[in-house]
Amino acid sequence: MTQISWVRDELLLACALVMENGWRELRQNDLRVLELSDLLRSLPLHGDAAVDQRFRSPNSVSRKTTDIATAHPGHVGPTTKGGRPTREIVSDFLAHPSEMLAAARALRDGIASGELHRIPVQPDEIDEDGGQGAREGRLLLRWALHRERNRGLRSRKIRQVQRLNLPIRCEVCTFDFGLTYGPLGADYIEVHHVTPLHTTDPRETRLEELALLCANCHRMCHRNYEGQSWRTPDAVREEMHSAASHAASRVS
Ligand SMILES: [Zn+2]
Ligand SMILES: [Zn+2]
């Protein structure tokens, strides 16, 4: 079998387990390892790799927990070769423990309920470099993007804004599709969750959690940049303002 590299989602689940185990490795006959092996073998990420019994076997999962445990900066003794993604997930867990544990929980939950298996691959879950930059992994990003494409949710949000007599336009740059494209663009807008899926209940969305964005600003909210592929409209607006002031200072 050719080795299939561990992706972010898998490392997220394994690292949560190691962290909950006090940053110690887990043996291959440990029930939690057996359970994680089953879970990893069911993830809709590597095609039919699970046909091979050795794929993410309890033994390979146990070895990965050793890689993770020895990548912890507090570890003394010999380290194993976990590679850069393993070191990165450990430092993300150390820097953002509650966010990362919540993401692991949401991922487990989405897999266990079968929900994540029903969501088709989203065209923008892989960025233009082909990378999978989402801190929370690719499947949670897939879920989030899918949720934002829910047409019922979008029209409820648009109706709410219309009832308040507010224009249907981008909350970041004020772009108005109807003004620019006429009837073709009337009422066109995209919706974006102002809180990432893994910190909220993926099955419940309050309209207040949705922002209306033009296609450009929405893309910038999800572009993989500096280890993140999710940001708030406020964060994108700030980037815009600082870019504009840089441009202005170059001109003057
Ligand atoms: Zn915009
Ligand atoms: Zn979005």
Image: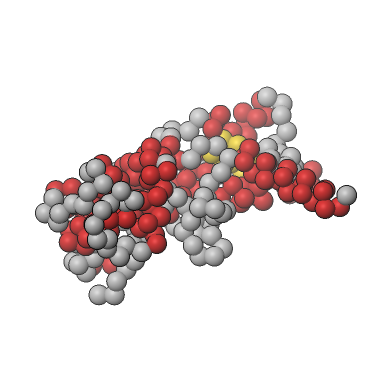
Is residue 220 at least partly visible in the picture?
A: yes
Residue plotted at (29% across, 71% down)? 3
Q: How many marks?
A: 0
* Quadrant in which the N terminus is drawn: bottom left
Would residue 75 be found to the left or right of residue 118 on screen?
left
Would residue 39 be found to the left or right of residue 133 on screen?
left
Q: In this rendered view, identify the residue nearer to me: 58 or 165.
A: 58
Residue plotted at (27% across, 63% down)? 80
Q: Residue furthest bottom?
A: 2
**Res 104 quadrant in image:** top left
Q: How is this picture coloured?
A: secondary structure
Location of residue 56 in the rendering, given as x and y in whole percent from the top left corner: 24, 62
Location of residue 182 in the rendering, given as x and y in whole percent from the top left corner: 79, 46
Does 50 sit above or below residue 72? below
Would residue 77 be found to the left or right of residue 248 on screen?
left
Location of residue 13 in the rendering, given as x and y in whole percent from the top left corner: 31, 49
Q: Residue furthest top?
A: 164
Does 165 sit above or below residue 71? above
Is residue 186 at least partly visible in the picture?
A: no
Q: Residue furthest right?
A: 252
Location of residue 234 in the rendering, given as x and y in whole percent from the top left corner: 63, 37
Q: In this rendered view, identify the residue nearer to me: 138 or 17.
A: 17
**Res 64 quadrant in image:** bottom left
Residue plotted at (18% across, 66% down)? 53
Q: In this rendered view, identify the residue nearer to me: 7 or 189.
A: 7
Q: Residue furthest left?
A: 29
Q: In this rendered view, identify the residue nearer to me: 109 or 34.
A: 34
Residue plotted at (17% across, 58% down)? 58
Would residue 216 be found to the left or right of residue 123 on screen?
right
